[in-house]
Image (spheres, grey):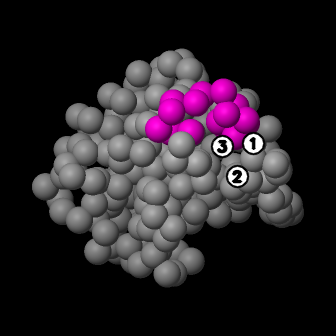
Amino acid sequence: MSDVVIISGNPNEISETEQVLKYLGLLLIEEGFSVKHISVKDIPPETLFNTDSQNPLIQQMKQSIHSSHGIIIGSPVLQGSFSGVLKAYIDLLPPNIFEQKPVLPIMTGESLDYHFILEYSFKPLLANLKGLCMKGAYILNNHIDKFKENPIIDRETSQIIKKQLSHFTSILPSRSSNVIYMNDVKLKGHETFLSKSRKPIN
C-alpha cells in the first residue's frame, strides 16, 4: 500500500505534466510518505480503446488507488480540455474510487486563457469519482523546464505548488518513504526505500 498515488494523464514520454508530478513525488518522499506513480502512457492502447476494465494492469492500478490515502492527478490542456487519454483511463475506474480521499489536481498548459479548465472541467470530472477535490494549480508550460530535477522554474509558481502540497500532506498520516513506478503488468513495481524524517515543505 502507498500513501499517495500520483496519476499522470500525459501520454508523451517526457512532458511538463509528468515531470512536475515526479517532482511532487520526490517532495512527498522527503516528507516520509510512500508514493506510487501511474501514467496513462503505460497502459496498452487496446485496453483503453476496448474499455477493458478487467485488464490485470488496470486491476492492479485500481487496487493501488483504493488502498491509498490521497491522490495527485495531473493533465495537460489539449485542445481546450483535459487529456482524452486520461478520460479514457478514468472511465475504466469505479465511480467512487476516490471516495473520502483528498485529491490534488494539477494542470499544465501553454496559455493563461485555459486556466478556467481546471475549475470548470477537470475538477468536476474528478468530483464524479467522489474525491475531496482541493484547490489545485494550473501551471504555464513556460514556467516549467522538464529537463531539471526541480522543473518549476518560476519562483511564484513554485511557492504556490508547495503551499498546495503542504495543505495536501497535512491531511495525510505520516508513513515510511517508498516510491513505485508502475510500468509492467508482470511486476509489482520498482521500489526504492529511503530513510528520511518528515519535515515541512518549504
- For the point 20% across and 44% down, the residue is 116
Residue at the (29%, 74%) spot, across then down: 142
Look at 80% across and 59% down and name the residue there. 190
- Give the number of the disc on residue 4: 3
In the rendered image, the vertical position of residue 30 relative to residue 55, given as above or below: below
C-alpha span from label 1 to label 2? 12 Å
Number of other residues with Cα within 10 Å of mark 1, as a class: few under 14, some 14 to 19, many 20 or more: many
Q: Earlier in the sequence, mark 3 or mark 2?
A: 3
Residue 65's x, y, as percent? Answer: 65, 34
Res 113 seen here: yes
Q: Which residues are magenta?
A: 47-61
**Circle 2: element type:** loop
For badge 3, the amino acid type reads: Val
- In this rendering, does residue 35 appear at all? no
Question: What residue is disc 1 on?
Answer: 2
Q: Quadrant of the C terminus?
A: bottom right
Q: Amino acid at mark 2?
A: Met
